[in-house]
Image: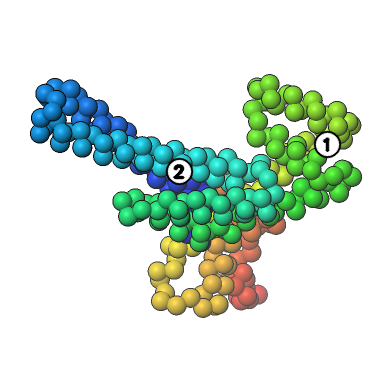
């Protein structure tokens, strides 16, 4: 797994910003040529040369502007429709994801290698990036069964969370769904809110774990089951030296989970402590 949603969105945004700068540069170049052309006498060799360059500059400007607009539109679709937590079903996300990748491939060019790099990164990470959507779909199905409503109603409430509560569109849709679902509306709203809060997107949790483990991997050339078991034991029983939650300081994950203090470290390892009679 090479990165989470934040990383791929950042990469997409960088490509879009670069293309936008290229388009702006092409506009600047075209304006400079027009200014130079206005200063020379017509029907001269210099004027004909500048007109030829201007035609080429205009074509390049149109191409780069169209490319920039297209890629930026694809970026917005990826961010706001495919990777947004409150979004459509997994199958719809996958279809739109593949469409975006295909559109990027059609716009690949040797002058813009970053588009190809982005397209390859997206292709390789699709299932990982959309893993959260499958879990979200299952949770929404469970909510629909619990409240005995159709799945689309639950999905509509999920999509409602994409709108700003300060907007008219939010409250118009809120009223429609409230009328449709009656007394079940508030319960479903709260259930969907909890599900959205508890659904992590992409690989952030895995990356956090990997970043913690990576510091210990350089100690050995190969990692066997015994070493991993020892590392697991160490991390589970090592006390937190600092934490944003004051109650965790000086306690280990095991102590926090069980609510009991550690026995002596020898006993934790399975040895019997020597005690004087």
Look at the numbered disc 1 and give the secondary structure of its residue.
Answer: helix
Question: Percent x, y for residue 66?
Answer: 41, 39
Looking at the picture, tell me which residue is in the foreground, 195 or 264.
Answer: 195
- From where the camera sits, is residue 273 visible? no
How far apart, in angstroms, are the residues tagged by discs 2 and 1? 40 Å
Give the mark, 2 or 1, whose residue is nearer the N terminus. 2
Residue drawn at x 64%, y 27% as measured from the top left: 164
Looking at the image, is mark 2 or mark 1 nearer the viewer? 2
- From where the camera sits, is residue 138 visible? yes
Residue drawn at x 45%, y 63% as measured from the top left: 214
Looking at the picture, tell me which residue is in the foreground, 231 or 30.
Answer: 30
Q: Is residue 155 left or right of residue 36?
A: right
Looking at the image, residue 4 lies above or below residue 53: below
- Quadrant where the C terminus is found in the figure: bottom right
Marking on residue 187: 1
Q: Which residue is mark 2?
A: 71
Looking at the image, residue 266 lies above or below residue 123: below
Crowd around label 1: few <14 · some 14–19 · many ≥20 (10 Å):
few
Marking on residue 121: none
Q: Quadrant of residue 184?
A: top right
Q: How is the image coloured?
A: rainbow
Q: Quadrant of residue 196?
A: top right
Crowd around label 2: few <14 · some 14–19 · many ≥20 (10 Å):
many
Question: Percent x, y for residue 33?
Answer: 20, 30
Question: Percent x, y for residue 195?
Answer: 72, 45
Look at the numbered disc 2 and give the secondary structure of its residue.
Answer: helix
The total number of labels drawn is 2
Looking at the picture, tell me which residue is in the foreground, 257 or 60.
Answer: 60
């Amino acid at each position: 797994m090479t990165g989470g949603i934040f990383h791929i969105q950042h990469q997409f945004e960088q490509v879009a910003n670069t293309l936008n700068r290229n388009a702006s540069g092409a506009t600047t170049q075209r304006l400079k040529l027009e200014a130079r052309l206005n200063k020379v006498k017509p029907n001269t060799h210099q004027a004909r040369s500048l007109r030829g360059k201007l035609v080429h500059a205009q074509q390049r400007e149109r191409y780069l502007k169209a490319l920039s607009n297209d890629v930026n539109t694809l970026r917005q679709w990826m961010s706001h429709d495919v990777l947004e937590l409150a979004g459509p079903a997994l199958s719809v996300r996958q279809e739109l994801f593949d469409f975006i990748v295909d559109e990027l491939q059609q716009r690949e060019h040797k002058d813009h290698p970053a588009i190809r790099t982005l397209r390859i990164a997206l292709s390789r990470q699709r299932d990982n990036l959309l893993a959260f959507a499958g879990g979200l779909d299952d949770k929404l199905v469970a909510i629909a069964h619990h409240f005995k409503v159709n799945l689309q109603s639950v999905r509509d409430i999920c999509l409602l969370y994409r709108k700003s509560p300060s907007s008219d569109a939010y409250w118009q849709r809120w009223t429609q769904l409230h009328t449709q679902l009656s007394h079940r509306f508030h319960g479903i709203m709260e259930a969907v809110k909890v599900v959205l809060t508890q659904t992590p997107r992409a690989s952030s949790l895995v990356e956090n774990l990997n970043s913690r483990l990576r510091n210990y991997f350089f100690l050995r050339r190969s990692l066997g089951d015994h070493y991993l078991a020892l590392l697991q034991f160490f991390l589970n029983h090592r006390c937190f030296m600092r934490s944003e939650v004051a109650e965790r300081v000086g306690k280990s994950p095991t102590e926090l989970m069980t609510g009991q203090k550690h026995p002596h470290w020898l006993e934790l390892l399975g040895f019997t402590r020597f005690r004087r009679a």
